[in-house]
Image (cartoon, coloured by chain):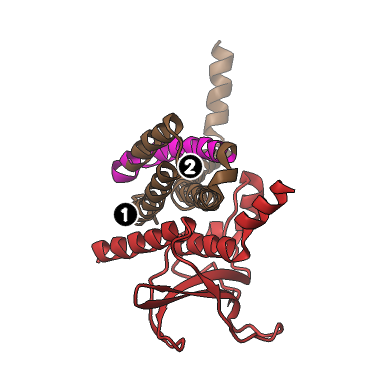
Chain colours: A brown, B red
Amino acid sequence: MVKLIAMWEFVRDWPWAGFANFASIVALFFALKALRDVRELRAYYLGKVRLPELSLVLRGLTSVLSTQISAFAYSGEAIGLTLTRIEVNLHSVEKKTGGRPKDVAKAIRKTIGKYRKSPSREACAKVYEALVGLESEIENFRRDSEWEP
Amino acid sequence: MANETNSVLEAVIRLLRLTQEGVLKWSLDSYSETPLDSHEPRIEGAFTTKYKATYLRLIAQREYHPARDVTAPNDPYRLWSTYSSHLSRALGVKVDDGKPYWSKEVYLQIVTEYGRVLWTFPKNHATHDLYNAVEYQVAGVNSLVEELLKE
């Protein structure tokens, strides 16, 4: 044990030990910097890529729904499928946003539920109108979001 | 301003609904062709209709966006922007890399009887859907499907 302590004291007092301490402080500095960068990167993708990607997907589905309303007589089942995809993305909107967009997304899911109970062109058009409204809400949310750099 | 934007959006949605229901009838409009080697805006299609006493025109055009430097000096994320293509591959997400591209823009205009533009509606997503609905109507897809199904 005494030998071990003596060895440790020998290593500790050796000139390069000071350099090792200095190197570990520098390494710690870079590690903290990298951690900050990772957090910034996460914020960047959450705020600038993931939500915009989600709104792009919703835009595509809204556009598809609009075309299906034009061909309402022939696209009953297809509308059901589109609405299911929209519902999944509305869940994501609710997770990624808060306030107004979240409330609108919830309301749209209720409107979709009403369409499912009694499908009609009118009910489908209401879903479409609400989705276009949600697009504006998401844009506003992105503009005001704290994630924006 | 927000209310005005919402009202315009609602008006476009109303036009879309009238088009989908077949109440508002659109017809093809003539337009001048742009040379294919030019980067000038290129009109893809134009349609006109008359709603009450107002003439409306809907045009779709391709617009060229030149290459941009996405690593602007005031961009706080320029380090990440520089490596955006590598990051996008690694994370499986699409990142704006500043390459040139063509975009499709749709404009809804109030025009005179002779086609002179009086006012252009602000850009919104519903205008694109209106254009798709108009194309669908003018192409006569519904009647074609009905005829094919009868045979």
Residue type at the position of mark 1: Asp
Q: Would residue B80 be seen by someone viewing this image from the given angle?
A: yes
Q: Cα distance, mark 2 to mark 1?
A: 26 Å
Which quadrant would residue A8 be assigned to in this image? top right
- Amino acid type assigned to the residue bearing label 2 in the image: Leu
Question: Taking B139 as reference, is A6 above or below it?
Answer: above
Residue B101 magenta-highlighted: no
Q: Which secondary structure class fits the magenta region best?
A: helix
* In the rendered image, the vertical position of residue B17 relative to residue A127, given as above or below: below
Quadrant of the image occupied by residue B66: bottom right
Q: Are marks 2 and 1 on the same chain?
A: yes
Task: State whether residue A39 is above or below residue B48.
Answer: above
Residue A28 pos. (x, y %): 49, 40
Label 1 Cα neighbours within 10 Å, binned few <14 / some 14-19 / many ≥20: few
Residue B78 visible: no
Q: Position of residue A145 (x, y in %)?
A: 34, 51
* A28 sits left or right of B138 in the view: left
Q: Secondary structure at mark 1?
A: helix
**Tag 2's secondary structure?**
helix
Q: Which mark is residue A144?
A: 1
Residue position marked by numbered label 2 in the rendering: A35
Callout 1: residue from which chain?
A
In magenta segment, residue A102: yes
Q: How many C-alpha atoms fall within 10 Å of the one at disc 2: few (<14), some, or many (≥20)? A: few
Q: Quadrant of the N terminus of chain B?
A: bottom left
* Numbered range of the magenta stretch: A78-103
Q: Provide residue B17's location: percent of width, then percent of height.
A: 42, 56
Residue A11 place in picture, x, y as percent: 57, 29
Residue at the front extreme of this rendering:
B150
